[in-house]
Amino acid sequence: MTDFPETLSCPVPILDHDTVQLAHGAGGRLSAQLIEKLFLPRFGNDTLNRLEDQATLTLPSGRVSFSTDTYVVDPIFFPGGNIGELAVNGTVNDIAMNGATPLFLSVGFVLEEGLPLETLHRILVSMEAAAKRAGVQIVTGDTKVVNKGTCDQLYINTSGIGVVPEGVHLSAARCEPGDQVLLSGTIADHGMAVLTSRKGLSFQSRVHSDTAALNHLVEALLEVCPRIHALRDPTRGGVATTLNELAAASRVGIQLRGDSIPVKPDVRGACEILGIDPLYVANEGKLVAVVPGSEAEAVLTAMRSRPEAREAQIIGEVVSDHPGTVTMTTGLGGRRIVDMPIGEQLPRIC
Amino acid sequence: MKYLDEFRNPDLAQTILSRIRSLTTRPWVIMEICGGQTHSIIRNGIDQILPEEIELVHGPGCPVCVTPLETIDKAIAIAGRPDVIFTSFGDMLRVPGSHKDLLMVKSEGGDVRTVYSPLEALQIARENPHKEVVFFAVGFETTAPGNAMAIHRAQQEGLTNFSELVSHVLVPPAMEALLSSPHNRVQAYLAAGHVCTIMGWEEYEPIARKYQVPIIPTGFEPVDILEGIYLAVRQLETGRHEVENQYARSVRREGNRPAQELVARVYEIAPRKWRGIGEIPASGLRIRDAYAAFDAEKKFFVDDIQVQEPETCISGVILQGLKKPPQCPAFGKECTPQTPLGATMVSSEGACAAYYRYQRLAPETV
C-alpha cells in the first residue's frame, strides 16, 4: 500500500531540476546527483553504496532461483499501490513461487523526459517500503532517460535472486490426482483496480489492488507442509490461466467448485458492469497452492492465520479425468469448462 | 450482491426446475433470442439440467455476430484514416473483417479506442476538435437510445467532428423471419429482457397471435431463464400463445417511451443485412436525413463497400437455431476463438464461442 505518512516523512530532496532531464540518464553530473540524492537514500545498503558496475554477492548454499519482470502499468498510481511497489512485489513473488527465499533485487528504470522528480521520489519511497517488508535488498540498478513521448512516464524492470531451501521441490508439473487446490484470498482486485482507475470509466469504485509480497506466506506454508506440489501467483490472465497452465504442465484435470472462489462485492460489481469474468483478471498478492489432499486442511489453516491470506479457500481438486482441462461445477449442478483466455478480455456490448 | 444473488440462488433454481419437470409431457423447442441469455445458459449449465424433452436453441441476438462483414470492412476503412479517432465497444475490435480486424488497425497506427458509452465518444470529440471521432453504433434496441442520444447532443452542441457508423438491428423482424422459414423448429421464444425494457412488449403481441408461439420477455440470470422456460412450457402444455412477462422487475408493457421517442427522432427503420442470414426487410435502423451530417458512411464515402460472406461457415444455420455448434464439422478444429471462421465464434456472446469456452468436452466426460 502507498502510505501517505511514508511520503510525508521523506521530503523530496532539493535538486537542480524539478523534472527528469535527458542529462539525468547521460552518466554525468546530473546522473550522479540523481543517484546520490534520490536512489541511495532510499535503497542504500553496503553492496549498493559501493556504486560498482555490478553487485558482488555471497549466497547461502542451495539451488538459486532467478527471475525478471518488467512493469509498464497504466496508470502508474492506482488505488492500493503504484508501479514501484508492484515491481518489487512482483519479482519477489515470482521467486517465492518456487519456494525460494528472495534475497536480492536489481532495479532498472526507463524514465520519460519531463517526469516530475517528485513522482519518481514517491515511487522510490514505496519501493523502499516494499523491499523492507519483503526482506530483500536492492543491490544494483540502472537508469535511462528517453525523449518525451517515447515512453509513458516510467517503466521499471526488476530482477531477483533467491535460494531454495533443502527438501523443497515445487513445480507446475507436480500436480497429482487427489491433490487439493487452495487459493489464498479474493480474486481480481488488482486488475479491476487498474481498469476502473483508467481514464474514461465514469464510475467510481472502492476497488483496491491487492499488491503484496507473498514470500513470508510461502515460508509459513512450507513450514507446515514441505511437500506442497506447486505454487503459482495468478497474475496476468488470472486464476483461470494459472490453473490451465498447471493442468497442462502436469497432464491432469482440475475440477473447481464454482461457489468457492472468493470475490469482493465491489470487485464483483465492477466485473458485472463491464462484462468481465473475475477468473481472468490479474491478481498481484494472491497465490494458488496445489497440495496433497491429506495436508490441505493444515495448509488452509496456516494460510488463514496470516493477514495476506485471511480469506483463503479450498477451491477445487486435481483429477485424472480430462487431462489439461479445467472444469467448474455450477451452482445449479451443471458443469462447464474454464478455458484459457483468448487475447485481452474485452467489455461486451450488452 | 442485490438483484444478482437472488437470481442465482441454487435452491430457487432447483424449485423452478422441478416445476418444469412435473409440467413437461412432450418435447418442446424453445429459442432464447439473446446472446447474453445463451452465454448464461451455457455458463451455468442450464441446458444440462433441463428435462430431455426441452431443447433450447440459440437465437440470433448477438449484435457482434450478426453485424455483416461489409460493415466491419467499412469500420476498418474508416479507422485506418489518419484524421480519425475510431471508438467502439470492446467486443467489436476482434471481429475479423475480410482481411483484418480493428485491433490490427490499431497496431498499424490507427487511433482505435474502446469506450464504454457513446457519450464517452462524444467527450473525445469535444476534446479533439481537429480530429474526426467516429463511434461504431452496433446493437439491438438496447443500445439504440444511448447512440441516438449521442447524435442528438452532438447536434445540439454544434459538434461537427462526431459521427456514427450505424449497424443497428431490431428483434421482432428477425423473430418473424425465423418463424416464417419452412425449416422453422421454434415453438416458443424467450425474448430479450433488456430489449423489452426499452421497447415494451406490445410489438410482440401480433407475432404471438399470428404464429401461435408463446413469447416470454426474460432476464439473464439462471433463475430468470429457468422461470422463463417454466412460463413457456406452461403455455405450450396448455395450448396458449401469449406474451407473458418474466422480467417484471425491469420490463413494462409500454417500455421506456422517452427512449423510444429519442430513437425515432434520430433513426428510421430500414432494411438491414444480418451476417449469416441475409437481408431482412425493415429489420434495422439508419440515421434520418435530418441528421445525415452525423452519418459516418456518408461522411467517409464507404457506403458503396460490398462484401460477400464466406461460405465455409454455417453460422447462419446456427443463428437460425437449425444446428448446434458441435454439429459443424469445423467446430473446434479449423474454427476456434483464435481462428474464427464466423462471427458466432468471435463474440463471447456468440453460440459457437459459448460452446467452445464452456462445453467442449465430449458429453460423456461432462
Image: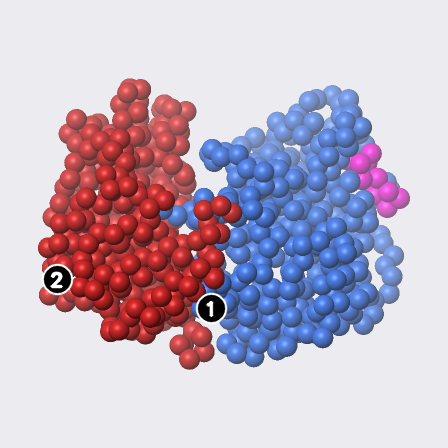
Discs 1, 2 touching: Cβ within 8 Å:
no
Amino acid type for the residue under numbered disc 2: Ser
Residue A333, numbered label: 1
Label 1: few (<14), some or many (≥20) within 10 Å?
A: some
The one of B106 and B349 positioned closer to us in this rendering: B349
Give the numbered dot on residue B67: none
Q: Report x, y in % for residue A101.
A: 79, 58
Colour assigned to chain A in the rendering is: blue
Residue found at x 71% / y 53%: A310
B77 sits left or right of A99 in the view = left
Q: How is the image coloured?
A: by chain
Q: Secondary structure at mark 1?
A: loop
| Residue type of the residue flagged with mark 1 | Gly
Q: Is residue B96 left or right of residue B338?
A: left
Magenta stretch bounds: A38-48
Residue at the spot 71% in from the left edge and 63% down from the top edge: A300
Q: Which chain appears red? A: B
Residue picked out by circle 2: B181
Characterize the local packing of mark 2: few (<14), some (14-19) or many (20 or more) Cα atoms within 10 angstroms. Answer: few
Q: Chain of mark 2?
A: B
B179 or B233, which is in the foreground? B233
Is residue B160 visible from the viewing direction of this image? no
Q: Give me the residue at 77% from left, 32% from top.
A: A6
* A224 within the magenta span: no
In this rendering, is residue B245 above or below A162? above
Residue A28 % position (x, y): 74, 31
Q: Quadrant of residue A76?
A: top right
Badge 1 and badge 2 in a common chain: no
Question: Where does residue A221 sit, x and y in percent of width and height?
Answer: 77, 63
Image quadrant in which the N terminus of chain A is located: top right
